[in-house]
Each structure stands twice: as structure tokens, then as C-alpha cells.
Amino acid sequence: MVITMAEGVFSRKWGMRLVFSLLCVIFILLKLTPFSTAPQLWSGPDLMVVLCLAWAVRQPDYTPPLLVALVFLLADFLFLRPPGLGAFTMVIGVELLRRRAPALRDATFVTEWATVAALMILIPIVARLILMLFFLDRPSLGLTLIQVIMNIAIYPFVVLLSQTLFGVRRQAARDATLGAV
């Protein structure tokens, strides 16, 4: 029995989607674990957002919109956030990156980082506007800003770990044509 190249790509793609899902579930569980009962004065990075955007810009096939929606909808329910808001903003963000992925393929890392950073700033702004539109409580602006800064700062480390541990590298032009078949 001969395994064709398409079957190898197919299994790798689905395997990495499973890895992405498992990592997101681990991040959710870590965030739900009560390490301290004191109120937080600062906010750490949202590793799910950073991982999702890093993988979306580097290997768009690993973060399909339906999977992103399901994972972030689960997070919305478990973190008692407005259901679907996080999923909606992340799906829009991932789709924007998927459309820009071919242009970012040959760009420098700084360009990629700046593009993702702009999206990391835009996502909470859109979420806050939607919350304001429906007269819902918004999270503290200070904590949101700290989280955005932490997300931008940790992005290179998440990319480095994704590349070394999971082999999530930038998609080459040849690989992009194979994935489309």
C-alpha cells in the first residue's frame, strides 16, 4: 500500500488541528484553576488568542474557522463571558490573517508581528464596541490594555515554541498550492 503525499499532508493537518484543540483546552483549564483568590491587579497574556493568531498566520490550515469558533465558544461559556462574542471576534481575526497569509509569507518577522499586534489591538476594541452597543458590562480598560500589551510581548515566544515544539513554520508557496488541492 502506497501512501501518497496528499494523505500525508491530510493526516498532518488533522493532527495539528487536534494539537491546537488540546492546547486550547489546556489553556482553558489552567485559567480556570484557582491559583489565588485575591483580586487581580494585572492581567497576564491570553495564550489562546496568541496561539490562535500565530498558527493562523503561519499555517492557516491548522486553524479552520469552525474549530476556532468552537474552541472560543467553549471559552466564552466557561469564563462566563457573553456567549459567542469571543468566538465571533476571533473568527473574524483569523479570517483576516488567513487572507493576509500569502502576503506575509515572504515578509519579515517584524512585519508579521506588527500585523498580528494590530489585530490584537483591534479584537478587544471590536469586542468593547459590541458590548457598548448592547449596554453590557465591559471588562476594566486597564486590565484589557495590560493583556493586549502582554499578548503582543509574548507573541515571539509563542511563535518560537510553536516552531520548535510543533513544527509550525511559515507556509511556503509550494505548500500553499498543495494545501489548496
Image (spheres, rainbow, N blue to C red):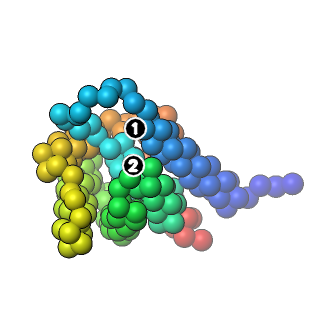
The residue positioned farthest toward the left in the image shown? 142
Badge 2: residue crowd in 10 Å (few <14, some 14–19, many ≥20)? few
Residue shown at 62% from the left, 55% from the top: 14
Q: Which residue is mark 2?
A: 79
**Residue 13, horizontal then vertical, whole percent:** 59, 55
Q: In which quadrant of the rendered view does residue 45 lie? A: top left
Amino acid type of disc 2? Phe
Residue shown at 65% from the left, 58% from the top: 10
> Mark on residue 49?
none
**Residue 167, horizontal then vertical, whole percent:** 50, 41
Badge 1: residue crowd in 10 Å (few <14, some 14–19, many ≥20)? some
User: For this view, does 14 lie left or right of residue 149?
Assistant: right
- For numbered disc 2, what is the local secondary structure? loop
Amino acid type of disc 1? Lys
| Circles 2, 1 touching at the beta carbon (< 8 Å) | yes
Residue shown at 17% from the left, 49% from the top: 140
> Mark on residue 31?
1
**Residue 143, horizontal then vertical, whole percent:** 18, 44
Nearest to viewer (mark 2 / mark 1): 2
Using the image as rendered, state which of residue 66 and residue 38 is in the foreground: 38
User: For this view, does 101 lie left or right of residue 143?
Assistant: right
**Residue 80, horizontal then vertical, whole percent:** 38, 52
Residue 55 appears in the picture as rendered: no
Against 14, residue 166 (above or below) is above
User: For this view, does 65 lie left or right of residue 117?
Assistant: right
